Image (cartoon, rainbow, N blue to C red):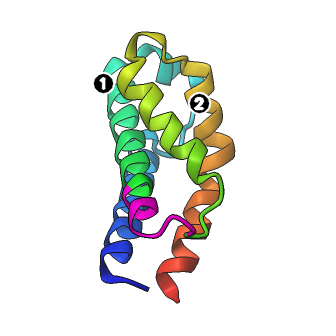
Amino acid sequence: MQREILKYLHDIKVSIDSIYDFLGDRRDLNVYRTNKLLRRGIERELEIIGEAVNRILKINPSFELSDSRRIVDLRNWVIHGYDKVDDVIIWGIILRDLPGLKNQVEILLSQ
């Protein structure tokens, strides 16, 4: 695998780990909704994840990463539609999508 792609995969892993660090062991939607600093930090990490995926796809458009287009679209939505970001949708992504992405990235990095 190309060194540049490995770097972007590492960036994705670091951002996912940061999101989990921000949330701590107690993952509570109400805490997330009422903590602007937490929301903005997580949104920023999601932007980084989306940008890293976008850069990987520019290097190798056929790179196998589940939901890569959705990840890039999320990045664009958070950045350009900042006033329409829905906390419940972001929370769902954290709970449903991030664990699988983390697992996939860790597998790719270990190859």
Residue 68 or residue 21, whichever sits in front: 68
Q: Is residue 54 left or right of residue 74?
A: left
Screen quadrant of the N terminus: bottom left
Residue shown at 53% from the left, 74% from the top:
106
Q: Badge 2 local density, few (<14 within 10 Å), some, or many (20+)? A: some
Give the x, y percent position of residue 104: 60, 68
* Residue bearing the label numbered 1: 37
Q: Is residue 76 visible?
A: yes
Q: Residue furthest bottom?
A: 111
Q: What number of labels is visible?
A: 2
What's drawn in magenta, residue-wise?
55-62
Q: Earlier in the sequence, mark 1 or mark 2?
A: 1
Element at badge 1? helix
Estimate the spatial distance between the alpha carbons at disc 1 and disc 2, rounded to whole Å: 15 Å
Residue 74 or residue 99, whichever sits in front: 74
Residue 8 or residue 21, whichever sits in front: 8
Q: Main secondary structure of the magenta part?
A: helix
| Label at residue 91 | 2
Residue shown at 46% from the left, 49% from the top:
20
Q: Is residue 67 left or right of residue 50?
A: right
Q: Is residue 82 above or below residue 67?
A: above
- Report if residue 33 lies within the magenta region: no
Q: Is residue 28 visible?
A: no
Give the x, y percent position of residue 54: 42, 52
Residue shown at 41% from the left, 64% from the top:
56
Residue shown at 58% from the left, 78% from the top:
107
**Amino acid type of the residue that numbered disc 1 sits on in the rendered structure:** Leu
**Amino acid type of the residue that numbered disc 2 sits on in the rendered structure:** Trp
Q: Quadrant of residue 100?
A: bottom right
